[in-house]
């Protein structure tokens, strides 16, 4: 069997848009898979072509609701039972990752639970991008190829040719990621120190650093309700920033997020297309990571290093 047809790519329902672009880049057809829905909401997965002895790549982001995760688990189980040679989960957005440690008594560690579910279902490899916390890689006993959205976001930011640029982190937890961007551009780093009243609700925020007459780029891994990032943008604008933009890997954008971004001081907010975004907001721009994932799949098939893909 030649290497061109030794592998096959399949997709779950809600990540098909990205899987099709990955297949275009790989110059291969998207595999035929049928998901049958029952009236009570249950569903079943079946492959409509032989996958025996093939390397299977299953493209599915596990953003809520949980149907996306359950679809992926059933796809893995069906591939294992159909005698696939290897089963590679391609999860551009790894959901449930915010629960990555026990930060107070009697809580679940959702990221570890999802890792266990994927492992028991039968994956041989995980290919993902910008995990909420790097240590989640250690929850798996199979190889994890952890890609970085900086591969597509940095070239976009360079293309803006901004002068007096400052990189900002919307919270102290994201300072490592923001510092990587600041080092790449050789520009100052600004931090926002926030305190939360409860999940998704910010009590107060202070800027650590100078943003006066600067073009600020806020860097984050995901934007959910957009409360933090829009408050940070508004405070920086009040502190004399010339312009404020934001870049984030994953476009969760739930609830009032689109309205908040539209009404904020942000010039624009740039995401990858790891999650589909349907609420059109004039300030939101998405850049595709399809080519980056396609190139990684190629390198996995050919047993080549993927580290040369990383810009930082």
Image (cartoon, grey):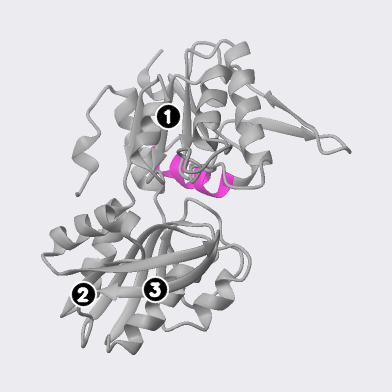
Q: Which residue is mark 2?
A: 209
Q: Report the label total.
A: 3
Tell me the residue at 47%/47% (across/down).
21
Tell me the residue at 39%/60% (across/down).
248
Q: CA distance from mark 3 to mark 2?
A: 13 Å
- The mark lying in front, picked from 3 and 1, is 3
> In the shown orientation, is residue 166 left or right of residue 259?
left
> In the shown orientation, is residue 142 left or right of residue 154?
right
Q: Position of residue 178 (x, y in %)?
A: 26, 59
Q: CA distance from mark 3 to mark 1?
A: 36 Å
Binning the other alpha carbons within 10 Å of mark 2 as few (below 14), some (14 to 19) or many (20 upward) gives few
Secondary structure predominantly adopted by residues drawn in magenta: helix
Asked if the magenta segment contains residue 126, the reply would be: no
Q: Which residue is mark 3?
A: 205
Q: Which residue is mark 1?
A: 126
Give above or below for 282 relative to 75. Answer: below
**Image: magenta residue range:** 15-26
Q: Position of residue 259 (x, y in %)?
A: 58, 77
Viewer-nearest residue: 170 or 202: 202
Label located before the other in sequence (3 or 1): 1
Residue 43, image quadrant: top right
Q: Secondary structure at mark 3?
A: strand
């Amino acid at each position: 069997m030649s290497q061109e047809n030794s592998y096959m790519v399949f997709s779950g329902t809600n990540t098909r848009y990205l899987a099709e672009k990955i297949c275009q880049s790989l110059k291969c057809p998207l595999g035929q898979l049928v998901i049958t829905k029952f009236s009570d909401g249950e569903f079943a997965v079946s492959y409509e072509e032989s996958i025996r002895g093939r390397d299977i790549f299953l493209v599915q982001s596990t953003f809520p609701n949980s149907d996306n995760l359950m679809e992926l688990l059933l796809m893995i189980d069906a591939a294992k039972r159909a005698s696939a040679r290897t089963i590679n989960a391609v999860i551009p957005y790894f959901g449930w990752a915010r629960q990555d440690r026990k930060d107070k008594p009697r809580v679940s560690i959702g990221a570890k639970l999802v890792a266990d579910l994927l492992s028991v279902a039968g994956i041989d490899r995980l290919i993902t991008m910008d995990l909420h916390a790097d240590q989640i890689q250690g929850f798996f006993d199979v190889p994890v190829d952890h890609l970085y959205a900086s591969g597509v976001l940095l070239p976009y930011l360079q293309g803006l040719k901004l002068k007096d640029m400052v990189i900002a982190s919307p919270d102290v937890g994201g300072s490592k990621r923001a510092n990587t961007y600041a080092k790449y551009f050789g520009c100052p780093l600004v931090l926002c120190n926030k305190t939360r009243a409860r999940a998704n609700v910010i009590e107060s925020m202070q800027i650590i650093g100078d943003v006066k007459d600067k073009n600020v780029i806020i860097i984050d891994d995901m934007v959910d309700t957009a409360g933090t990032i829009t408050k940070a943008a508004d405070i920086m604008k009040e502190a004399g920033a010339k312009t404020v933009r934001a870049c984030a890997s994953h476009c969760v954008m739930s609830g009032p997020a689109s309205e908040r971004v539209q009404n904020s001081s942000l010039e624009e907010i740039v995401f990858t297309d790891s999650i589909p975004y349907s609420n059109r907001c004039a300030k939101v721009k998405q850049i595709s990571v399809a080519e980056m994932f396609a190139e990684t799949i190629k390198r996995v098939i050919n047993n080549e290093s993927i580290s040369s893909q990383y810009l930082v």
